[in-house]
Image (cartoon, helix red, strand yellow):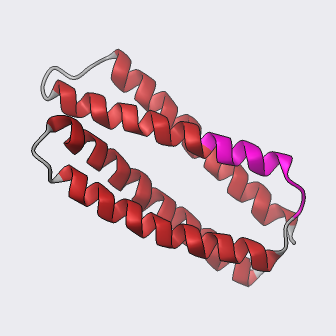
Amino acid sequence: MEPPILLHLTIGLIAWAFLSMGAAVAGLYFPAKANTECWRGFWFMNAIWGLIDGLIGWANLLTGPVEMEFLRKILMVNSGLDLAYITTGIILATRQKPLLKGFGWAVLIQGLFLLIFDLSFLGWSYRV
């Protein structure tokens, strides 16, 4: 496998994790004046996603080289999961409870980013 693609993928995922967790810390530390429960759910869910993305990125750093075909399969499966996250986010964002709305918007944003991220790297994997 070409090392640059896995390294770029890992760095991108870890950067997104830090961005998600940093924004969540700021959002939770400086709470909004309106819709407090919705925003708390939004920032808390982003923190959870950031933690998970960071752990996945860290695990990538610890693994050895992988075959390009295996990486492509993982990216395809992840893209399907991303569509499920987007759907779940939309469903949660339309709920009445403010906390669920916040969770939904966070899941929707995370799912959209990860779908673009995974499809971008999937496309790159076919060009190398």
Q: Which quadrant does the N terminus fall into?
A: bottom right
Q: Is residue 97 magenta?
A: no
Residue 8 picture location, percent across and down: 73, 57
Q: Which residue is drawn at 86% across and 70% down?
A: 2
Q: Which of 84 and 11 is in front in this view?
A: 84
Q: How far across and down, in percent of the image, does residue 125 sit?
A: 72, 77
- Work out whether residue 103 or residue 30 is closer to the camera in this orientation and state it: 103
Q: In this view, does 122 lie to the left or right of 82?
A: right
Check residue 59 for magenta coloring.
yes
Left or right: where 31 falls relative to 15 = left
Residue 107: give x, y in percent of width and height: 36, 50
Where residue 86 sits, quadrant-wise, is bottom left
Q: Is residue 12 left or right of residue 81?
A: right
Q: In this view, does 75 lie above or below 43?
A: below
Viewer-proximal residue among 126 and 99:
99
Q: Residue furthest bottom?
A: 126
Q: In this view, does 26 lie above or below 104?
A: above
Q: What stretch is highlighted in magenta?
A: 54-65
Tell me if residue 64 comes above or below residue 41 in the rendering: below
Front residue of this view, candidates 27 and 90: 90
Q: Is residue 16 left or right of residue 32?
A: right
